[in-house]
Image (tube, grey):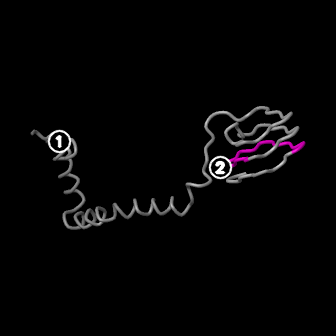
Amino acid sequence: MKSVTFEDSLFEDCYFEDITSSNTFFKNCTFISTVFYNTDLFEYKFINSRVLNSTFLHNKEGCQLDFSDDNNAYMIYFVSFLGTLAVLPGNIVSALLMDKIGRLRMLGGHLGRVGLGDPPAQTRLSTF
């Protein structure tokens, strides 16, 4: 069950087993002689509901992950695409420099800069 709201319903002699619900609520419902086994239906999901002669056995514990509403495949792939698109200009400039200067000279220049102890720009401390 996901994103279901039951209103003014009667559940009599029912058996709920292995239920994982997201955004499921029971409003003004009545449960008579009902068994809840291995569910995540906790007290806050029963709004103004009456539970009569019912049993809760082996309730699920801990944080139940909910992937139902927020994460759809389109957004996940779109964000990955934007991340790939963001590094594209740097890859193009790097390829052009490597073609112009050469792989070994670029590698040697980078190793020489690191060998001199010139820290990267983000770790330099500025003085005020």
Determine which residue is flagged by label 1.
124
Residue 12 picture location, percent across and down? 88, 44
Number of callouts in the render?
2
Q: Residue at x 73, y 51 (%)?
A: 1
Given the image, on which type of amino acid does mark 1 rest? Arg
Which residues, given as a range, are shown in magenta? 12-27
The image shows residue 92, relative to residue 14, as above or below, that is below
Kindly indicate whether the residue at mark 2 contacts the one at mark 1 (C-beta within 8 angstroms): no
Q: Is residue 16 magenta?
A: yes
Q: Which mark is residue 25?
A: none
Determine which residue is flagged by label 2.
23
- Mark 1, Cα crowd under 10 Å, few <14 / some 14-19 / many 20+, is few
Given the image, on which type of amino acid does mark 2 rest? Asn
Between 22 and 74, the one lying in front of the other is: 22
Residue 94 picture location, percent across and down? 26, 62
Query: Which image quadrant is residue 49 in?
Result: top right
Distance (Cα) linking label 1 and label 2: 49 Å
Element at badge 2? loop
